Amino acid sequence: MRTPWYDKIMSLDKKILYVIMFIVVMIPLLAKWTYNPAVMPEVKDIYDEIEGIYAYNQSHPDTPQGILVSFDYSPSTNAELDPMTMSILRHAFMRNIPVITWSAFPDSIDLAKTITTYIAKEFRAVYGQDFVFMGYPYPMNAAVIAFGSDVRNFLVKDFYGNLSTDLPLLNKIYNYKSIGLIVTVSGTSYPRFWVTYANTLYGKKIATGTTAVSAAEFYPFLQTDQMIGMMGGLRGAAEYEKLVEALEITIIGDDIERYLRNLYSPEDDFPWDTKIFAPGFTDEELREHLSTRKTARTGMASQASSHFYVIVLIILANLGYFFKRRAENKR
Amino acid sequence: MLIWYTIAVLLSLAIFSFLWKDNPLYKFAEHLFVGTMVGYQVVVVFSQIIMRKIVDPISVALDNRQILTLISLVIATLIGLLFLARFSRKVEWVSRYPISITVGFWSGYAIVASFKTNILTQIRGTVVDDLGQPLLNGHLIGDFFKNPSLKTLDLATAGPLLVFGVIVVLVYFFFSVKHDHPMVKFANKPALFYLMIGFGASFGYTFMGRISLFIGRMNFIFNEWWPLLKQTIGG
Amino acid sequence: MKKITLILVLTLLSVPLLAAQETDNETPFYACDVSLYDTPNDDGISVELEFMPANSAEEVPQYAIDLYIDGTFSNTIMVKNAGALFLHTVPVEKKGSIVRAEIFAYDTQGQRQGPIVVKEATSSAQWYFSDRVGAFIWSMAFIGLIMVLIRKAKRGQEIFIRRIAGLEAIDDAVGRATEMGRPVYYIPGTSIIDDIATLASLNILRPVAQQVATYETPFSVPIKDPVVLTVAQDVVKEAYMAAGRADLHDDGIVYLASVGQFDYAAAVNGAMVREKPATVFLLGMFWAESLMLAETANTVGAIQIAGTDSTSQLPFFIAACDYTLIGEELYAASAYLSREPLLLGTLKAQDMIKGAVIVALIISIIGMLFGSDLLMKIFLQ
């Protein structure tokens, strides 16, 4: 007897499904399609908040507000989350907002350091003055409390071994009073932790970048304003990327490549520490700096096509199941 | 650079080969990962915890002659070291002191904060929206009848649906009332409906997340490793 | 003591008022509204400044605020006249610092005029954060309830808990395995022993093991964590003894499958494919391995009873399993089956607080319908 079509569908080998998925994901990547997302309000809110800090700093040059970017993820989720931290940092550095970063997990210390300096370099940010990297503030919960009074007592040295009291930025911004926004980028439940302590106890504004897996968990906090905004998954990252790109065009102009190429001249004596980052970009680095400006949007094209593929699979499987059941009932 | 990228690509592919079936390549990649992770953690614990959290603060306090800070740091370190007593059966009980101190401190610190965060503020969010407007808003419902459109329908129904959902789901998780209690019976179906919609949304998001991770790896292979390989071979 | 505090507070509050009275009479042309007051609910290390220009931007394009702390000059803040409220928090070193703000106006020629207003305030520390009263009362009520109810349960008083729907399925599922002569698998999650879900799962393991022993069904409990292993071994051994079938117990029932997340999943999946269990319990905390396990159990044709409090894994269990204990139902099932006073008391207290929350919610909503947020402020501060 011939096997009916629905049985064939229902017993399709998983390996075939994987191979088709591989192809579906690969094509947009190879064809370099990008996806142009509509910006959701919860993402726009984060952007507006950082613009608000910029405006505040313009009117309060002596007592500027900084942002704290907490890398609360390990490299296993960096595909979704790296584009978010990069976009947030680009926005902050472009607006000259003091930035403090740290990483909540030991395995992401290197990742956090690399991304922070990578973006700082694009905007000639000076270590200690425009940004600091505090390493791994273990234990995290104590670090969150320490920021309530004076974080320099808890983190006596930064990642590179400088005394915190020697860093001009930390002497201006050492507790929550001068932190305008906390951005927690995480694939874990850390955002909930930040809301519980930094928001409930200290009234700080929290913005979250989260993996799609955890996004549904945090919507209730958006509704009550316990989080001012959220970037959910690769899509949220793509939206923020788009906003930052638009800002970059208004501030720097269309030709980012030329801007980066001329950023550092050989006779430049800028007060950076070459331990933090070396001046100048090679061609290879230049290409990479340009391509990280649209990682999320490139990924979203593949994402969209894979979603389409899965929707088709779900419909087919349900149809198969339906007809199989009907045939069985007839018998 | 190319060598490192190539190793990364080969390891990624070795891990993906598990989709076909469990094989030695996958095993090798996995063990390599676990081994490097352990080594890395040891280094981090030493440089970022022992150095940064014990040695540095103590030496800074010594330099600045902050006697009180110094004393409290030393005492805290000693109490922390009592944890090590766990390795001996005889003096294991000593390790309970640091445990009770941390648990006691954190319970006190966390109870009110998490109660306020997860319950009070959330319930408040069920009564009013973030602008202080009530969720059960007669005006919005009136607006819908005056000007029926999808947007006004959404505005008018969002609040009441939320309030209803919160209440029925809370009742669903009531365990001290009998099954056939009218309240539980009434809430059962709609509560499950709400829960399933919630899980469905979470399911979709989770799927998106899993695919993103895969795309991230593919992006690395095709947009970072491949151009680099081409450049190196070609140039 | 109370009186002294009250007088102190009143005096401190009146400082800005007095200062305002002194200066209000003499502002003919240059004007502004300034209030300087101690930051409420803080430890006395700041003072709030609110500044609202009263002249138009044409008359006064810019203001300057000179700040003095304890009589010494601190800094000047330049404020562009945007016709909008300007807020600033003045940080001070210690509580009890006197902050003085002198406001100057710049006329169209850029000449500094004034001081047009002078204000003073003293920073003070508050003993209690008044915003937390509600949370404090609720927490105390909750803790009190838990203690009372646990004591009640310990004294042996009846605490009613309804049967969870999924629990009924346990009997049928074990019975089915017996009929088919195939094993029962019990996976107590992949978390550590500290996890509440693991503890709840081990509580459910006991009656399941007892039933399996009574029916003489083959049983298998693969474990991921070594500590959970020792506890689970004890639980199963005791259950077999309680069922009077100590002879059937063997040490291979509870075993350590693997300690890594995905190798554990691979090992258990392999065992399931070989032994084809008729019933699989997946109760406890799970991560990304949840669907791998549930999928394999499904393909070998097992009935699956799942339960977890992980919201991101629940959808997978609901899609792939026959019965799923959702979130708190897992704890309730464990309390129901173990009759442990601690669990029963806590569960009952949780129910009562849930009831109180619903009542507070409804009262606040009714209050809001009548246009008053007073009730909400009382209950949900």
Image (cartoon, coloured by chain):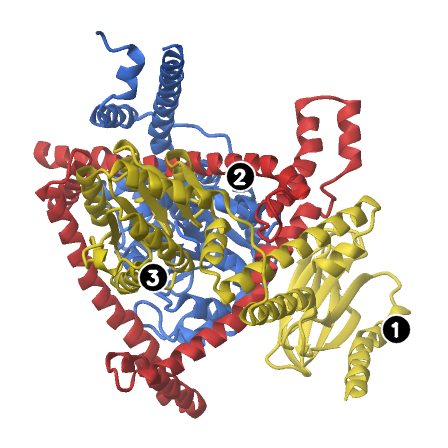
Chain colours: A blue, B red, C yellow
- Which residue sits at x=30%, y=34%? C298
Q: Position of residue C223 (x, y in %)?
A: 26, 55
Residue that carries the numbered disc 2 in the rendered image: B195
- Which residue sits at x=35%, y=69%? A158
Chain name for mark 1: C
Outermost residue toward the front in this view:
C244
Camera sees residue A220: yes
Distance, label 2 to label 1, CA atoms, is: 60 Å
Residue that carries the numbered disc 3 in the rendered image: C242
Q: Position of residue B59 (x, y in %)?
A: 33, 85
Q: Nearer the viewer, mark 1 or mark 3?
A: 3
State the SS at label 3: helix
To the question of a shared chain for discs 2 and 1, the answer is no
- Which residue sits at x=34%, y=65%? A136
Q: Is residue B99 left or right of residue B171?
A: left
Residue B183 - label = none
State the SS at label 2: helix
Type of the residue with mark 2: Leu
Q: Nearer the viewer, mark 3 or mark 2?
A: 3
Residue that carries the numbered disc 1 in the rendered image: C21
